[in-house]
Image (cartoon, grey):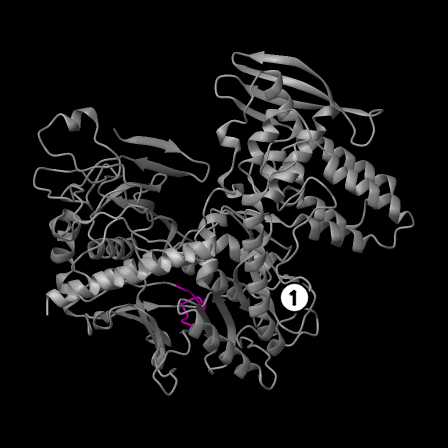
Amino acid sequence: MLMEATSPNTEDILEEEGDEIEDEGEQLFGFEHNDHDDGSDSENDCEQNFQIDENGHENDREQLFEFSANDHENNAEPVLEVNVQDHGNFGKHALEVKGNYDEKGSLLMLVVEDSEEYNEQGDITRSIDNQCSTSQNKHYPPPVVSMEFESYDDAYNYYNCYAKELGFAIRVKSSWTKRNSKEKRGAVLCCNCEGFKTVKEASNQRKETRTGCLAMIRLRLVESNRWRVDEVKYEHNHSFDPGKAQNSKSHKKIEAGMKRKLEQTVDVEVQTIKLYRTPAIDASGSGSVNSCGKDNGNNAQLRHLRLKDGDMQAIHSFFCRIQLTNPNFLYLIDLTDEGQLRNVFWIDPRSRAAYNYFGDVVAIDTTCLSNKCEIPLIAFVGLNHHGQSILLGCALLADETLETYVWLFRAWLTCMLGRPPQIIVTDQCKTMQSAIAEVFPRAQQRLYLPLVMQRILENMGRLRDYEAFHSVLNRTVYGSLKADEFENAWQNMIQHFGIQNHVWLRNQYEDRERWAPVYLKEMFLAGLFSSQADEYVIPFFDGYVHEQTSLEDFFDIYDLVTEKKHQTEALLDFESREYSPLLRTSYPYELQLSKLYTKEIFEKFQGQVEMLSTCVSISEVHVNGPIITYMIREGEVGTLTEYRNLEVIYDKATVEVRCVCGCFYLNGYLCRHALCVLNYNGVDNIPFPYILSRWRKDIRRLYVREIGSNTVDISNPVQWYEHLYRRAMQVVEEGMVSQDHYMVAWQAFKESLNTVRLTADKHV
C-alpha cells in the first residue's frame, strides 16, 4: 500500500517495499512507483556455489587504479581522470600510478590530483560520472558515502552496473518527491533479495527469492542539483549467481536502454571517474571559508605544502620503505595543477582492520595544527579495548580550507570502504565541522571536552579569582546531572565572576550541546568524554612530536612510535589474559567482569563496584507497569556529610537500567547507581547488553582486512588471490600470539604447500 508522510522539510516521502515492474520510470497520479516482481523475472534465488564461513563486505576487493593527467583544453574535461581497468593476467589487483615507478618497475606512489571545472555561476564542483559497459573486463568501484552523480539515472545505472558485475540484481525500494511536485528528491536502491514477501505474495507458486538482504544505497538530491550517496550498506546474506543476475530486469534495462549510448563511448574498456574540487566561499563572499583563524590568501591559487630541503626525499623514502615491508600500505597524494605537493594521506592495513573493531567513535587530532608545529600533521584516532589511542590514518595538509578537509575526509572514508563512524570528535574549527557535515552527513559531531576546558581556562587566565573560577567551572561541567542544572549553574558562575559580556565565552556556551557531558548521555562515546576532570585520552603522538620536529625526524620516529604502540597492546593483551584480580567486594558483578574485561577497563569498573558503599539508600518514586523510577541517595565522594540524589530508571521486563549520570554511554560500563538498582532487584549478573565486546579480553582481534565476501567466484583468479591472501594473513596473525602458535602455523604452512604441490603435479 502506498504511504504518504509529511516531513518538516516539506517533502513527501512515498515508499513501497515491492519487487520490480517492467516500466520502472512511469508515474501514476504524480507518485513514484517501486518495482514489483512478475512471473518472467529470473532473479538470484540465493543458491550458494562456493561457501566460505566468514562474514564481510561483498565488494571488499582491491582494484587496479591508473591515475593519468590529461590536458584541460577548452574546459571540456577535468585535468585528472581516474581509469579503472582490469589486469587479471597479473593474478591480483594493485594500485598503480603512470610514470611513478622505480628502476625495477615497482610502484612508488598513488597520486590523486583534483582538477577544477566551473559551472555557469563560477562555482567549482566535485562529482563522479559513471558509464556502464557490456565489457566483461570492466570493474566498477564500490559505492561510498559522498559519491555524486549528474542525475538520478546516472546514479541508478552506476549501481546497476556495479551490481551486475558482482552478480546480484537491484530494485528501487523507495523514493520520495517534493511536496506538490513530481520532482524526485531521493531514493533507496537495494538488492533484489531485500526484505520478504507478504503473505499474499508468498501464496503464489513462484519460488521465494528474498532473503532479507540489507545491501543498499540511499540517494539524495543536494543543492548543486547532483545526486549524492548518503548511506551505503555492503553486506549481503546470500551468494551471488552472475548467470541468473544477468537475466534480471534491472540488468536487462542496461542492455536495452544503454546499448545505443554505450556504442558511442570512445573506450568501453575504461570507466572514467571525474573528480572536481569544491568551492571555498564564505558567507561574505570573500572567497575564504577558513574559520580557524588563519589567513590562507587567495583560494584561486591553492597553497601547497611548505617543504624544506630533503623533505620530499624523506616522504618518498618513507613510503617506499613502508611498502617494502607492508605491501598493503596505502597512501594518496594530492597535487596542484602545477604539480606541487598539496596534501598527503596514508594508512596501513592494521589501521584499516582496527577500524572494524573500534570505528564507532573516531577523534581527529589536530594538535600539530593548533600548536603551529613545523609539520602540519593531522591524525585519525580511535580507542582500543584497553582504552588506549590507536592510529586510524595520518595526513599532512597544506592549509585548513574546506576543500582540503573535504579531500582528506573523502580519501579516508574511501579507505574505510565507505563506512563512516557514528561519532566524530574534533576541535572547534568551523571549517572542519563544515567538511565533516558534507562528507559524513549522518555522523554526530562532538567537540573534545578536555580541549574545550583547556581553552576556557586559558582565556580566563587573567581573572582575579582564577583558582576559584577553575573549581566552579569543573563543578558546573562535570557535576551537573541535567541540562537545566548545568545551564543554571553556568549563569550563576558568569554572574558571580562578572563575565556575562565575555563574547568568546558566550560562544562556547552557545555550542555547549557539542561538548558538555550533560548533553551527551544518549550516545556511546567509548570513554573519550570522561565524567571526571582529571581523565582524558593521551594523543597518539604525545611526547614524540614537538613544535620543532622536522618532517624528516618525524618519519624517522614514526615506525618506532607505531611499533611501540603495537608492542604495548600485545603486552596488555597478554597481561589481561593472565590477569586474576584481587576482588575487593562480595558483589557478583565484580567477579563476572573480572573474567571478561581487559585489565585496564575492569579496574575502572571495579572502582564503581567499590563505590556502591556510597549509595546509602534507594527508594521507589514512580511506577509505570514494569518500568520503575528509583531515587538513589549518595554521599559525595570522599565525604558522607554531603548528599545528592540520582534518578535511575529500571525496566523489569527487559532488565534495562539507565542512570541520570550517563556513565554507561560516556565510559562504556555501568555506574554504581545502576548496579545498586540491579542488586536491589535481585539481578546477580550484569545483563548481556551492558557487556560490550570492545572491552572483552576473550575476543581475538586479527588486524587483517576483512575477507570481504561469503562467496568466491571459482572462475575468477583475482578472487582466488584475494581470498587466499587474507586467509593466510589470518594464520600469520594467529601465529604471532606465542612461540607455540608460531610453530603450529609454520607446520601448517609447510603441509599445505606440499599438498598444493602434489595437486599441481597430478595435472602436469
Q: Residue at x 20, y 73 (%)?
A: 267
Quadrant assignment for the N terminus? top left
| Percent position of residue 536, x then y | 68, 49
Badge 1 density bin: few <14, some 14–19, many ≥20, Cα 10 Å? some
Q: Amino acid at mark 1?
A: Cys
Q: Residue at x 70, y 30 (%)?
A: 610
Most frequent secondary structure within the magenta stretch: loop
Residue 104, magenta (yes or no): no
Magenta highlight range: 114-126
Question: Which residue corresponds to mark 1?
Answer: 368
155 over 38 or under it: above or below: below
Quadrant assignment for the C terminus? bottom left
| Percent position of residue 721, x then y | 27, 63
Residue 78 image-quadrant placement = bottom left
Along the line of sight, the residue nearer the viewer: 102 or 219: 102
Residue 116, magenta (yes or no): yes
Along the line of sight, the residue nearer the viewer: 178 or 264: 264
Element at label 1: helix
| Percent position of residue 29, x then y | 23, 36
Q: Left or right? Give the position of 486 relative to 270.
A: right
Q: Which residue lies most toward the right here?
A: 464
* Residue 650 visible to an observer of this rendering: yes
